[in-house]
Amino acid sequence: MSDNGKFEPRIVGFVCNWCTYAAADTAGISRLQQPPNVDVVRVMCSGRVDPVFILKAFAEGADGVIVSGCHPPGDCHYNSGNYKTFRRMPLIERLLEQYGIEKGRFHWGWISGAEAPKWAQLTRDFTEQVRNLGPLNWKRMFASKEE
Amino acid sequence: MSWVTLTIDGQTIQVEEGKTVLEVARENGIHIPTLCYHPALEPYGACRLCVVEIIRKGWSSLHTACTHPAWDGLEVKTNSPLVRDVRKTIMGLLLSRCPNVPIIQELAAEYGITAPPFPVEDPTENCILCGLCVRVCNDMVQAHVLNFSGRGVKRQVGPPFMEKTRQCIGCGACTSVCPTGAIEIVLEEAGVYQAKPLGPTAAIYVPTLQAVPRVPVIDTDSCIRFRQQDRTNGAIADACGACQMLCEANAIDFDQEDEFLDLDVGAIVVATGFEMWDATKLSQYSYGKSPNIITGLEFERLSNAGGPTGGEILLADGRKPERVAVIHCVGSRDHNAHEYCSRICCMYSLKQAHLVRDKTGAEVYEFYMDMRAFGKGYEEFYERVQEEGVVMVRGRGAEVEVLPSGKLRVTGEDANLGKLVAADVDMVVLSTAIEAPHDASEVASLFGLGRTPDGFFAEAHPKLRPVETNTDGVFLAGCAQGPKDVPDTVAHAGAAASMALALLGKGEVTISPAIAYVDEQFCSACKTCISLCPYTAIGFVEADNVARVNEALCKGCGTCVATCPAGAITARHFTDAQILAQIEGLFRIPVIEIPNTQYPIPDTQLPPTKESNHER
Amino acid sequence: MAELYRADVLVSCLHGRSPELVSALKQELDRRGLAGEVKVVETGCRGFCTMGPVLTIQPNGIFYTDVQLADVPEIVEETLVKGRAVQRLLYKEPATRKVIPNYDAIPFYSKQMRIVLRNCGMIDPQSIDEYIAVGGYEALGKVLSSMTPEQVIAEVQKSGLRGRGGAGFATGRKWEHTRKAAGEVKYVIANGDEGDPGAFMDRALMEGDPYAVLEGLTIGGFAVGTQQGYIYVRDEYPLAVQNLRSAIDRAHEYGLLGSDVLGSGFDFDIRIVRGAGAFVCGESSALMQSLEGKVGEPRAKHVHATDRGLWDRPSCLNNVETWANIPPIMNKGGEWFASIGTERSKGTKAFCLVGKVRNPGLIEVPMGITLREIVDDIGGGPPKGREIKAVQTGGPSGGCIPASMLDLPVDYESLTEAGSMMGSGGMIVMDDRTCMVDIARYFIDFLKDESCGKCSTCREGIKRMLEILTNISAGLGKPGDIEVLESLAKTVQLASLCGLGKSAPNPVLSTLHYFREEYEKHIAEQFCPAGVCRALIAYQVVAEKCKGCGLCIKACPQEGISGTARQPHAIDQVKCIQCGACFEVCRLDAIQVVPRSAVTVGSNGGNGYKPVREVVR
């Protein structure tokens, strides 16, 4: 909580090295306004994103998670890594629901290296969305259960 | 191939069999006048001007050189008194038929005839009925439009029944072969044929005049050989082929087709260049509504010495322009088109202004927003052009209007004066933007390239790796990466070539250390990873019953790592442990708390840093 | 087989009144119940044009001339029933008025030698049986059963036969070339595009004896080694086309055409192609272009048609008359044929004798006969006691041979040497009322329309020659015209593309050569001595000779002659249109032709006449 009592969500973004990371980088170089709430974890490919990472992020205290890679078809630096993401993410969505995590806290999608403004827009929109959902406090739930 | 020996004007000549006397004479520099002869067409022997005296087996007689085969033992006299006498009579006859055709007048004068010796029937008659047009139309073009009608003195050339016919494809072959200029092509409003005054003038042209080697190409969309249909079955007729017939080097091959080459290469330089932005997309510039509104590239064609006017800057009606306006930033720096600056337009516009001043002396108005004379010597050139009297109007040209008189009115705001200004000019040159080629996205996915928002290919790093791409071994050169002028392009291309050579010259490839490896102790031999690897870098080793990563092939994407159900695969530098630690770390570092964090943050207010623990 | 008749009535020719005559004869025979006894046969041309229609009654050989419809009952009654000749219908010798009952005794026929025209007028051209009955197809049978193609060619070479189309190329050599030319597919072609004005030899042949042409062509096809023959006939000859068509059909029926001719294994067929009537299509390369379906225009012929002709294949083209000569040569042998004629021109030649002779018609004479024999003996000499001035041979592009050279033997070389040519066989006799300038102008005018227009010398040169000739005959000639004419003629002759162009100046050149003073008179004296060029002449009454009979007054269409009976008449030069009617009717030679300048014309000082002929620009 901030001083004025306003809730500031913490969001982890798993981004692929070639597209979304490049977009985020460009957004930064271009000084595009984006909220500081999103922390980026770079992976080589969105296909590298193990579901464990997402759960870990929530478990560590994230209020929202973004996974973003290259546009299918064809944009993927590794030809087909994004397709694996494409297959994997809907499953994780269902898994998260079972854990009681609202749909709006998880976003996955595609942002190419040329789409820096889109990245900035996504971070702004998603931050606002998660802010409206309020804190998740999964970690505390775990903690209390463990106790 | 057998050889024959003949004598022409006392000169003994040995030639291959199968040529005509005329061909042999011309090859040996002996002049024989002709009117109905064309090297690409069957000899016809109608004008009779090429008569020569041929002595064979002791018999002398007159024959047309164009039709007579060069036989062994012939003795040919091309300029004997008898020949000259006969030619003189022929020229007298032709001059009396067509008294006002320059080439006939010249030839007649050569034989000492200055005035028609017989009564002139029709002083406007230009046709000598040589049949070149008829032959080219039927034998070459196979359009079968022109033919003779009537007999004897009533003979004339024309389409069937001397009426307009849709069979005419307007190819203009007849006008180009006509020796006397008797045929004129008239463009009709809704005609089949649309003139393209600034396009290539023939179906064979040299696409880039300065290129080395200067190899012409055939435009198969315009070439008669690729278009003319057989009248009977509609199939593509075996028409024309004049170029092939006339090419002495036998360099023309109609069967050549685009082919796909499979090459194994170690590096690729993507230099796919740019396209000109289509100026019709912004209708205020009226491009296409007047032939005198042209793009900068069309101006280049117009002022080119090899262009349609031979380098003269002329209006569509052939006049010299008196006032010319150049409008900068058409399609560039425009939220309705491209937002970026095309970089080259300022300087080429100035050059074109200079050319117009130099070649025609016309007044030139440059409508510009900012003058970006950023290169070496550019600013000096800008000043020079100003000194030449080019009028600089600071402000984007807002609109071009075609006036009923045909003049063009350019309006815009002169920001320096703070006033709306207008200029009525004869010609408008639009300095159109350059943009990424329309198929850039296909090229991008082919090579795994990224693209920047302007559509050009993304370099690996805008400052530090300007010619490399995110794909190893693929480099960018020139405008494929973004708008560039010639010096920048040369420099960029040089850099790309150097990078490629550096890569190849090493003889070995450095691969990224960030690759996957299998901890064989944990591998359960499920083979899930094998089918997932896009590089087939994981092989299954039957002997050891484990999967193993080929380090030279692995690019380190980590898909297998995320998939391995046994957790036996690790991505070096992106291990699970590292990433998890990274995630953990995120939540253990102090968070910058921003007061008044209602987004967006006002620019004026820099957030004071404050340590806080978000978690607790 | 056909029924037997006791008599045949042969009716010639196939034109004019003959069809009515035939039906009248048949009706009359029917009426008298003789239809089963006497056969009426329509035959081809007998050649005796002035006397047509002619009737020959066989087996007696009685020859009736100028038969009228009204004569039919008398002929049937007298000749066919009673066996007597009708005296007034028999031919009478013009000079002696002596009656000659049988046709072979008539000088018109007795001086002739009919080889090509052997069957013309003797058989029914539609009947193959009649052709076979007179020995037809014997030659083909002999060739196919006992000769090799080489032997056939050798026989033709031995005969010395030369092309009857005009140029006189040795036929045997042409066949040999075609046989030896490389190529599987070859053609034989019969040229029946007879375009010369006044010539109808080929027409008579194709109409009157079509099987002879077919047989000749078939033998030729066998000799040069081809299965396909063409006959190119001008479309103005519908009867020839019809007769040839039905002849081809019959020949097919009889196994004389088609596959396996006469069981010899030789396949041969003939197609008829109708020409569209261009004179130039008689030229070999133009004819072949026309056969191919293209515009009939000549090509440059440096390679012979025997190597590359129709559709670029070896082609043997001969005139129909040449082809019709082949069966007799095969039958009687080349040596027999070579025994006729002169040393270099063998056999006979058909001519169309027209113009100022008493007996114009179709004739066939042995080579080497003199022009005088043809004109005087066969033709009966000039009518009305006029003088022969010249004989024009070779069609429009032939030349005029002056009367002084009438003893010239008729053969290829002599005619060419005399500045004319054999041509396809036109022969026009001209008397002293013929103006040579006008004759040249007439032929050049014909050629102006018939030149195909392809090559500039022929098209433009002929046009300009015509211009000058027209001017000369209209009184607008000027000094130097003759020289310009000569240089034009020389250029056209030397530099033109085809035979038509090369020979087109012949009428001009030959008349200039033999009658130059006549041209000069036209220009210098403004006078046409023959009284033809109306612009240059006037008619005058010779007062001393005129007896005032008034014949001329009645004849004058302009009512321009006045005078009282038995007083010399006078011609009003203002009204006179120089038609010459008065001159023709005057029996006293009291009307004479004088130069226009010799008479005073018009009262108002003007010359009072309009040029009759429009001056060609």
Image: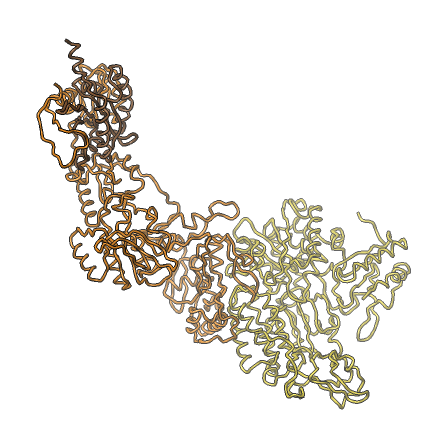
Q: Position of residue B267 (x, y in %)?
A: 22, 38
Residue B507 appears in the picture as rendered: no
Considering depth in this image, is B320 or B39 the residue closer to the camera?
Answer: B320
| Residue farthest along the top direction in this orientation | A147
**Vertical order, A126 against C388 (above or below):** above
Considering depth in this image, is C357 or C437 the residue closer to the camera?
Answer: C437
| Residue farthest along the front direction in this orientation | A4
Quarter of the picture holding the N terminus of chain A = top left
Q: Position of residue C234 (x, y in %)?
A: 64, 58
Is residue B311 rendered to the left or right of residue A24? right
User: Number of numbered discs present?
Assistant: 0
Which chain, by letter, is yellow?
A: C
Q: Position of residue B280 (x, y in %)?
A: 34, 48
Is residue C176 rendered to the left or right of residue C9? left
Quarter of the picture holding the C terminus of chain A = top left
Q: Colour of chain B?
A: orange
**Vertical order, C595 against B258 (above or below):** below
Residue at 79% across, 62% down = C17
Considering depth in this image, is C153 or C24 the residue closer to the camera?
Answer: C24
The chosen color scheme is by chain
Q: Colour of chain A?
A: brown
| Residue farthest along the bottom direction in this orientation | C544
Residue C158 appears in the picture as rendered: yes
Is residue B107 rendered to the left or right of residue B504? right
Is residue C420 rendered to the left or right of residue B441? right
Q: Position of residue B607 (x, y in %)?
A: 11, 32
